[in-house]
Image (tube, rainbow, N blue to C red):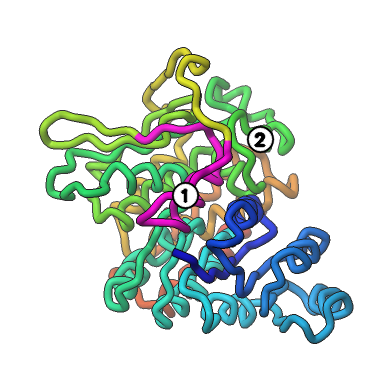
Amino acid sequence: MSRTITILGSTGSIGTSTLDVVASHPDQYRVAAIAAGNNLDVLLKQIEQFRPELVSVATEEGARAVQDRFGSSVEVMVGQEGLVAVATHEAADLVLTAVVGAVGLLPTLEALKKGKHIALANKETLVAAGHLVTALAKEKGCDLLPVDSEHSAIFQCLNGERLTDVERIIVTASGGPFRDKTRDEMAQVTVKDALNHPNWAMGAKITIDSATLMNKGLEVIEAHWLFDMPYDKIDVIVHPESIVHSLVEFADGSMMAQMGAPDMRVPIQYALTHPTRLPGSYKRLNLLEANSLHFRAPDLDRFPCLRYAYDAGRIGGSMPAVLNAANEVANGMFREERISFLDIERVNAAVMERHDVLTNPGLDDILSADAWARIAAREVAQKL
């Protein structure tokens, strides 16, 4: 089955891995449109190789660089309007959303309105507005295909199973670069330390979220919406080897796990090919080399961001969007060396404490809550 796809976030870690998958199966995929940020060197090479009809970039300067290189052979758009245009491109039947942050929400909703299936690598979309996204996908008969390795694992374990038979979902976490550090040690870590993930090659924002375990918290909220599972049935377990990508336990006591080498191209390819599978030339898991696997409970005292995410999910309404927005700001300020690593959690907690929750928020409510939380996060950070 051949597919025509568009990619939001083509120059990031997931976007480049997706295009690696496409290049490995050129007879299976056509790339109709791509959207990128400011990495023009990579974007220009992608346009040269995959020849999309439409390209969206972050700035007018970037748009001029693309037009200077490719002229009228490619249509170029800018900013949010461009993201939506890529997401709703007429030729595409599948949109892979790999932009980072809540910026992915509006393009995803517009793509669903046009009946596009979604391969979702932008967890913030479901965190901020899971009730709106899942309802629209159901209304339009569109698939929400998970790309994150953990959610892809759960999706595969649930294949052919009844949700009523599920006892719990277990989301695995590597534990990040600081999984064995004390609070005193984490108070002194640098941005470079936090970006040194032991297992995965990811973008900067996600890597910092992995270090605080906020990434795992966001994945818990995402799993709630993807699999219609209450939070009391979603557990997190630290698995340093990142070989078991997640597990599902059933009512009869049996447990199913999906395993593989830590390579994002594998879950990406599964999302693009579902319900079939194509051969993959990626590194295979060798259990003899793996030797042993380790598991332990997450320490919520050392990593409270995971607890905040559970709290936000259970509170519901506008709170998950507020936590997500505050975390985006705090994460960015840490990467800019304006606050310390442990200040990230302090900002998140303070903004959640300040927020008056809106129940059953509409899109405008979500966007307003997001904007409010970003302002509040900067105010809190300035006082730390």
Direction front: furthest residue: 27
- Where is residue 285 drawn, in percent x and y? 50, 27
Q: Amino acid at mark 2?
A: Ala
Whether residue 204 is visible: yes
Q: Nearer the viewer, residue 240 or 349?
A: 240
Mark 2: few, some, or many residues within 10 Å (few <14, many ≥20)?
A: many
Question: Which structural element holds mark 1?
Answer: loop
The CA span between labels 1 and 2 is 35 Å
**Mark number displayed over residue 58:** none
Q: Amino acid at mark 1?
A: Leu
Q: Nearer the viewer, residue 55 or 306?
A: 55
Whether residue 381 is visible: no
- Where is residue 331 drawn, in percent x and y? 62, 49
Q: Earlier in the sequence, mark 1 or mark 2?
A: 2
Q: Which residues are magenta?
A: 258-282
* Camera-nearest label, 1 or 2: 1
**Mark number displayed over residue 194:** 2
